[in-house]
Image (spheres, rainbow, N blue to C red):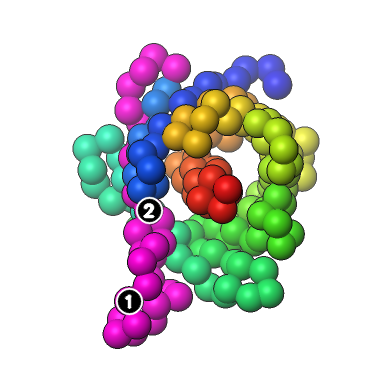
Amino acid sequence: MSEVKDYCFCSNWDGDGEIYNRDGEVVWRFRTTGLKRRPAEPGLFRSPVFAVSNAGGQGLLTISRERMLPLARFRMVENGLPVCTIRQRSILFTKYALEFDNGSRWNLHLPMFTVFIKGVSETGAEVLVRVRSRRQWYVRIGAGFDSLPMMGALAFIIRKKEQCT
Protein backbone atom coordinates (compact mmCIF):
# COMPACT_ATOMS: atom_id res chain seq x y z
CA MET A 1 0.00 0.00 0.00
CA SER A 2 1.50 3.34 -0.97
CA GLU A 3 -0.46 5.78 1.20
CA VAL A 4 -2.38 4.27 4.09
CA LYS A 5 -4.71 5.52 6.79
CA ASP A 6 -4.88 4.10 10.27
CA TYR A 7 -7.99 3.82 12.42
CA CYS A 8 -8.85 2.46 15.83
CA PHE A 9 -12.26 0.85 16.41
CA CYS A 10 -13.32 0.77 20.07
CA SER A 11 -16.51 -0.77 21.39
CA ASN A 12 -18.16 -1.68 24.65
CA TRP A 13 -19.53 -5.14 25.49
CA ASP A 14 -22.95 -4.28 24.04
CA GLY A 15 -21.53 -3.53 20.59
CA ASP A 16 -21.67 0.27 20.68
CA GLY A 17 -18.50 2.16 19.87
CA GLU A 18 -16.47 4.73 17.98
CA ILE A 19 -14.03 4.81 15.08
CA TYR A 20 -11.03 7.06 15.70
CA ASN A 21 -8.56 8.37 13.14
CA ARG A 22 -4.81 8.43 13.71
CA ASP A 23 -5.06 11.79 15.52
CA GLY A 24 -7.45 10.34 18.10
CA GLU A 25 -10.52 12.19 16.78
CA VAL A 26 -13.87 10.40 16.61
CA VAL A 27 -14.83 10.05 12.95
CA TRP A 28 -17.87 7.75 13.21
CA ARG A 29 -19.93 6.03 15.90
CA PHE A 30 -21.62 2.64 15.59
CA ARG A 31 -24.39 0.98 17.52
CA THR A 32 -25.57 -2.62 17.61
CA THR A 33 -29.36 -2.94 17.74
CA GLY A 34 -31.90 -5.72 17.61
CA LEU A 35 -29.87 -8.31 19.50
CA LYS A 36 -32.70 -9.26 21.85
CA ARG A 37 -35.54 -11.21 20.27
CA ARG A 38 -38.98 -9.69 20.59
CA PRO A 39 -41.57 -12.19 19.32
CA ALA A 40 -44.33 -9.58 19.02
CA GLU A 41 -42.24 -7.36 16.77
CA PRO A 42 -43.17 -7.68 13.06
CA GLY A 43 -40.39 -8.02 10.52
CA LEU A 44 -37.86 -9.14 13.10
CA PHE A 45 -35.22 -10.18 10.56
CA ARG A 46 -35.55 -7.05 8.45
CA SER A 47 -35.13 -4.57 11.30
CA PRO A 48 -31.75 -2.78 11.39
CA VAL A 49 -29.15 -4.68 13.39
CA PHE A 50 -26.32 -2.15 13.10
CA ALA A 51 -26.25 1.63 12.68
CA VAL A 52 -23.39 4.04 11.93
CA SER A 53 -23.55 7.78 12.58
CA ASN A 54 -21.16 10.68 12.30
CA ALA A 55 -19.30 12.06 15.32
CA GLY A 56 -22.26 14.34 16.12
CA GLY A 57 -24.69 11.43 16.31
CA GLN A 58 -26.50 12.06 13.00
CA GLY A 59 -27.50 8.69 11.51
CA LEU A 60 -25.81 7.92 8.22
CA LEU A 61 -26.27 4.24 7.41
CA THR A 62 -27.93 1.08 8.70
CA ILE A 63 -27.30 -2.61 8.13
CA SER A 64 -30.22 -5.06 8.13
CA ARG A 65 -30.43 -8.82 7.75
CA GLU A 66 -31.94 -10.00 4.46
CA ARG A 67 -31.44 -13.72 4.92
CA MET A 68 -30.43 -15.88 7.84
CA LEU A 69 -29.93 -19.40 6.47
CA PRO A 70 -28.00 -21.16 5.05
CA LEU A 71 -25.46 -18.29 5.16
CA ALA A 72 -26.48 -14.83 6.31
CA ARG A 73 -26.82 -11.91 3.94
CA PHE A 74 -27.03 -8.28 5.08
CA ARG A 75 -27.94 -5.09 3.25
CA MET A 76 -26.40 -1.70 3.97
CA VAL A 77 -28.56 1.37 3.34
CA GLU A 78 -27.24 4.93 3.27
CA ASN A 79 -29.68 7.86 3.09
CA GLY A 80 -32.46 5.50 1.98
CA LEU A 81 -30.43 3.99 -0.87
CA PRO A 82 -28.79 0.53 -0.85
CA VAL A 83 -24.99 0.78 -1.05
CA CYS A 84 -23.60 -2.65 -0.14
CA THR A 85 -24.45 -6.32 0.32
CA ILE A 86 -22.53 -8.25 2.97
CA ARG A 87 -22.47 -12.01 2.44
CA GLN A 88 -21.29 -14.55 4.96
CA ARG A 89 -19.31 -17.12 2.97
CA SER A 90 -18.50 -19.70 5.64
CA ILE A 91 -20.48 -21.29 8.40
CA LEU A 92 -17.70 -20.55 10.90
CA PHE A 93 -17.90 -16.74 10.38
CA THR A 94 -14.41 -16.68 8.87
CA LYS A 95 -15.13 -15.45 5.33
CA TYR A 96 -17.24 -12.55 4.11
CA ALA A 97 -17.78 -10.89 0.75
CA LEU A 98 -18.61 -7.20 0.35
CA GLU A 99 -20.39 -6.22 -2.86
CA PHE A 100 -20.72 -2.46 -3.16
CA ASP A 101 -23.28 -1.06 -5.55
CA ASN A 102 -20.58 1.01 -7.28
CA GLY A 103 -19.10 -2.29 -8.55
CA SER A 104 -16.32 -2.68 -5.98
CA ARG A 105 -15.96 -6.18 -4.47
CA TRP A 106 -13.96 -7.21 -1.42
CA ASN A 107 -13.24 -10.57 0.22
CA LEU A 108 -12.44 -10.66 3.92
CA HIS A 109 -10.76 -13.58 5.66
CA LEU A 110 -11.00 -13.78 9.46
CA PRO A 111 -8.95 -16.81 10.55
CA MET A 112 -10.21 -18.48 13.72
CA PHE A 113 -7.08 -18.57 15.87
CA THR A 114 -5.27 -15.37 15.01
CA VAL A 115 -5.62 -11.67 15.69
CA PHE A 116 -4.97 -10.68 12.07
CA ILE A 117 -7.70 -10.11 9.50
CA LYS A 118 -7.06 -9.40 5.84
CA GLY A 119 -9.32 -8.05 3.15
CA VAL A 120 -8.52 -7.86 -0.56
CA SER A 121 -10.48 -6.14 -3.31
CA GLU A 122 -10.72 -7.46 -6.84
CA THR A 123 -8.41 -4.59 -7.87
CA GLY A 124 -5.72 -5.71 -5.40
CA ALA A 125 -6.28 -3.08 -2.69
CA GLU A 126 -5.88 -4.38 0.86
CA VAL A 127 -7.22 -3.73 4.30
CA LEU A 128 -5.38 -5.10 7.31
CA VAL A 129 -6.94 -5.46 10.75
CA ARG A 130 -5.31 -6.39 14.03
CA VAL A 131 -7.61 -7.32 16.87
CA ARG A 132 -6.04 -6.10 20.10
CA SER A 133 -8.92 -7.25 22.28
CA ARG A 134 -12.61 -7.94 21.94
CA ARG A 135 -13.19 -4.24 22.45
CA GLN A 136 -10.37 -2.69 20.39
CA TRP A 137 -9.21 -3.25 16.79
CA TYR A 138 -6.69 -1.43 14.60
CA VAL A 139 -7.36 -0.99 10.89
CA ARG A 140 -4.92 0.00 8.14
CA ILE A 141 -6.48 0.74 4.78
CA GLY A 142 -5.33 2.44 1.61
CA ALA A 143 -6.18 6.11 1.24
CA GLY A 144 -9.33 6.52 -0.83
CA PHE A 145 -10.81 3.20 0.29
CA ASP A 146 -11.73 4.44 3.77
CA SER A 147 -15.26 5.46 2.83
CA LEU A 148 -18.16 5.40 5.26
CA PRO A 149 -19.72 2.23 3.75
CA MET A 150 -16.39 0.37 3.85
CA MET A 151 -15.63 1.38 7.44
CA GLY A 152 -19.20 0.60 8.50
CA ALA A 153 -18.98 -2.85 6.90
CA LEU A 154 -15.65 -3.55 8.64
CA ALA A 155 -17.03 -2.51 12.02
CA PHE A 156 -20.11 -4.69 11.47
CA ILE A 157 -18.17 -7.79 10.40
CA ILE A 158 -15.53 -7.55 13.11
CA ARG A 159 -18.21 -6.93 15.74
CA LYS A 160 -20.23 -9.89 14.39
CA LYS A 161 -17.17 -12.15 14.64
CA GLU A 162 -16.44 -10.98 18.18
CA GLN A 163 -20.04 -11.68 19.22
CA CYS A 164 -19.60 -15.30 18.13
CA THR A 165 -16.45 -15.88 20.20
Identify the residue under disc 2.
Answer: 32
- Residue 83 part of the magenta segment: no
> How far is the residue under mark 1 from the one under mark 2?
15 Å
Residue 25 figure quarter: top left
On screen, residue 57 above or below 137: below
Q: Nearer the viewer, residue 76 or 144?
A: 76
Amino acid type, mark 1: Arg
Comparing 122 with 159, the one in front is 159
Secondary structure category for the residue under label 1? loop
Question: Is residue 81 shown to the viewer in this render?
Answer: no
Find residue 109 and report its image quarter: top right
Whether residue 39 sits left or right of residue 83 in the image: it is: left
Please give left or right for residue 14 compared with residue 134 in the image: left
Q: Which residue is mark 1?
A: 38
The stretch of residues the image draws in magenta is 22-50
Which residue lies at the image location 43% right of the left edge and 74% below the top edge? 46
